[in-house]
Amino acid sequence: MCADAQSVVLANEKIPKAAKYVRQSDAKGIQSLTLIQGKYMRKYQIAVVVGSLRHSSFNRQLAHAIEKLAPPNFSFIQLQLADLPLYNQDDDANQCEAVKRLKSEIAAADGLLFVTPEYNRSIPGVLKNAIDHASRPYGQNAWGGKPAGILGVSVGVIGTAAAQQHLRTILAYLDVATMGQPEAFIQAKDGLVDQAGNIGADSRDFMLGWFDHYVAWVQKHVA
Ligand code: FNR
């Protein structure tokens, strides 16, 4: 074992099981979570799945904005869904590069964050297509065992509630541990995400509270 590898192992042994965070504000009043307990910060990689390909998607804007609320030991990768072909079971034995990339990025993640609109009272086809791809071939489900949070923005007043219920059913089958509370059914409103790409002032406390729980949920499920 080389010296670097050994020092990593030693550091990992001292990672606290339950790190503690406080909210802190910067000069502009933007709050984030800061680690206060735990000398060694275990790093968490989150795979973000946005269920819209629309250029100015509210859900993608929210996904980018919420990343800014995260503690520094959380990093995010947005999974690319646009180049996935339509799922065809005939291709299971020979998955294309885009599907292999999707599966390897999910496998490398400690947790999942779904941010999706509602289409016709369910999840968009683009999201279901990605879920199906990464669940196959049979026995090689990439989603299994990951903790997940679900957020959704839509223009309707129920703020993706119906879509989120369908998504929970699908993810339960795929052995994903979805956080039950707090729920976040968000109606698209001016100022939800401000010009600078931050969560707007009216929604910041709610989203920070949601993110506090999400951080704890991921930490609880990751050994
Ligand atoms: C929608 N929209 C929508 N909204 C909603 O609240 N409930 C719904 O069931 C639907 N259904 C629906 C179907 C289809 C095919 C489209 C294109 C749209 C409206 C939807 O909330 C709106 O287009 C959002 O802007 C989509 O999210 P993004 O793309 O902005 O992230």
Image: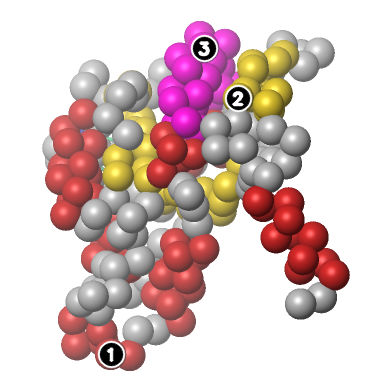
Within the image, what quadrant is residue 154 found in?
top left
At a point 31% along the width and 24% down the height, the residue shown is 181
Q: Are marks 2 and 1 in contact (CB under 8 Å)?
A: no
Q: Nearer the viewer, mark 3 or mark 2?
A: 2
Which residue is outermost to the right?
3
Quadrant position of ligand 1: top left
Q: Is residue 113 visible?
A: no
Few, some or many residues within 10 Å of mark 3 (<14, 14–19, 20+) = few
The residue carrying mark 1 is 93
Mark 2 secondary-structure assignment = strand
Q: Which is more N-terminal, label 1 or label 2? A: 2
Horizontal and vertical percent for residue 66? 54, 31
* 198 drawn magenta: yes
Q: Which is more N-terminal, label 2 or label 3? A: 2
At a point 81% along the width and 75% down the height, the residue shown is 2
Horizontal and vertical percent for residue 75? 62, 46
The residue carrying mark 3 is 205
Q: Amino acid at mark 3?
A: Asp
Disc marking residue 193:
none
Few, some or many residues within 10 Å of mark 1 (<14, 14–19, 20+) = few
The residue carrying mark 2 is 20
Mark 1 secondary-structure assignment = helix
Q: Which span is picked out in magenta?
A: 193-216
At a point 32% along the width and 34% down the height, the residue shown is 179
